[in-house]
Image (cartoon, rainbow, N blue to C red):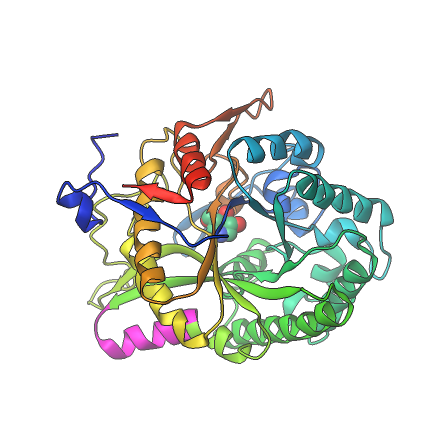
Amino acid sequence: MAAVPRIFVPSVRNNMTKILKFPKGFLWGAATSAHQVEGGNKNEWWAWSYKKSKMDILGIKVQISKTGRAADHYNCYEEDFNLVKKLNQNAHRFSIEWSRIEPKEGQFNFKELKHYQNVIRALKERNIIPFVTLHHFTCPIWFYRKGNWLNKKSPDYFNRYVEFFIKNIKEEVDFYITINEPINYASWYLPLQGAYQGNKWPNLLDILRAIKNLIKAHQKAYKTLHQYGPKNIQVGIAKNNIFFDGRPKILVSLADWYWNRMFLDKIKNEQDFIGLNYYFHSRIKPGFKNPKNWINQNENKIVSDLGWEIYPEGIYHVLKDLKKYQKPIYITENGLADEKDKLRENFIKDHLYWIHKAIGEEIDIRGYFHWSLMDNYEWEKGFWPRFGLIEIDYKTLERKIRPSAEVYAKICQENAVFM
Ligand code: IFM
């Protein structure tokens, strides 16, 4: 571990040991999403994986691989939650697979609903607070065929599923996330889906149309969840915000508005908390070369297995910007692909250092969910990026706790970070 430079945390740079205490009742957990871990889902991603396996999009190599049984979390959730408990986590974020609940338009599957009821119960029996995400990048095939999020009725279709779920789920859940990373989804995954079908890359207007529908979908779902959900229900969004810096300032502000603020501004009266997914720092520096590179002029002193820059200080700046919404904040995702588990321990501690600093500056942060609980299917990149606190052997399905997960377990137990 000593080989990994700790360049982001002043106290560590100065060789001072510090204990950072977190507020009482802070939630500590990890996150997953249905399609990435469950196995056996039949949604639009599953359908594409049977069409073509390789393509080149805007010079980026994309490989859609089959998910197969993935980590088989659908069947192994009890075993996995035993590990969550063993690792001292007191909260857990996971998602409901819409295509299981409504495989055909308007036809709901009570058996699958019961499955998720059991999943929620299994968490509660272990005193683990569930955070339920209703949409995490996947849709039923019928929804995709109707034009996906470009169809102006898409918010109603989504709301019908949400209404069915909240009216019929017999286990009470206090925390709901409607949609995961809507801007990332609309700006990258939806175009990718279109391109994968052999269509042309959508224009900006189409992307904005999808965003508009996602905003409406959230607003409707927010009302529905409050109308039929438990009285303590808290509804939010998981928003992946990026720390933009560089110049010219006008471009930085534009990027910040589009990526970080536009969606949150529109839903400011329809959210009880903000879920923050933090992964990226982006230094903007236009030049004569390819505009695609303008947004990533980072120093990349330390990068993950995916080549993503690790920049913990960025989470502090992003959190400071979220303060203006005056809502409680949960970090709903933060993590890295690190198969050898060389960087993860310091990654977690260094991000927590900056989160703790933000808390000290009166930002109301109430929980941290590491991405991810276990290795999983990283969308167009397939299974090779290893994000898990728990390693999965995809041949045997054996679960192995990575050393960094033990360090995180101590943090969860002590409600404190030892820097
Ligand atoms: O795996 C994804 C997740 O589905 C959404 N947030 C980012 C993660 C890492 O890329």
- Residue 168 percent coordinates (x, y): 83, 57
- Residue 259 percent coordinates (x, y): 42, 69
- Residue 272 percent coordinates (x, y): 57, 70
Res. 118 visible in picture:
yes
Q: Residue furthest front?
A: 24
Q: Residue furthest left?
A: 14
**Image quarter in which the C terminus is found:** top left
Q: Residue at x 69, y 60 (%)?
A: 144
- Residue 371 percent coordinates (x, y): 47, 45
Q: Quadrant of residue 69?
A: top right
- Residue 248 on the magenta segment: yes
Q: Is residue 59 left or right of residue 329?
A: left
Q: Residue at x 43, y 65 (%)?
A: 364
Pick whichever, 217 or 363, lies toward us: 363
Q: Is residue 398 above or below residue 20?
A: above
Secondary structure predominantly adopted by residues drawn in magenta: helix
Q: Residue at x 50, y 31 (%)?
A: 390
Pick whichever, 169 or 378, lies toward us: 169
Q: Which stretch is magenta? A: 246-260
Q: Is residue 153 above or below residue 333?
A: below
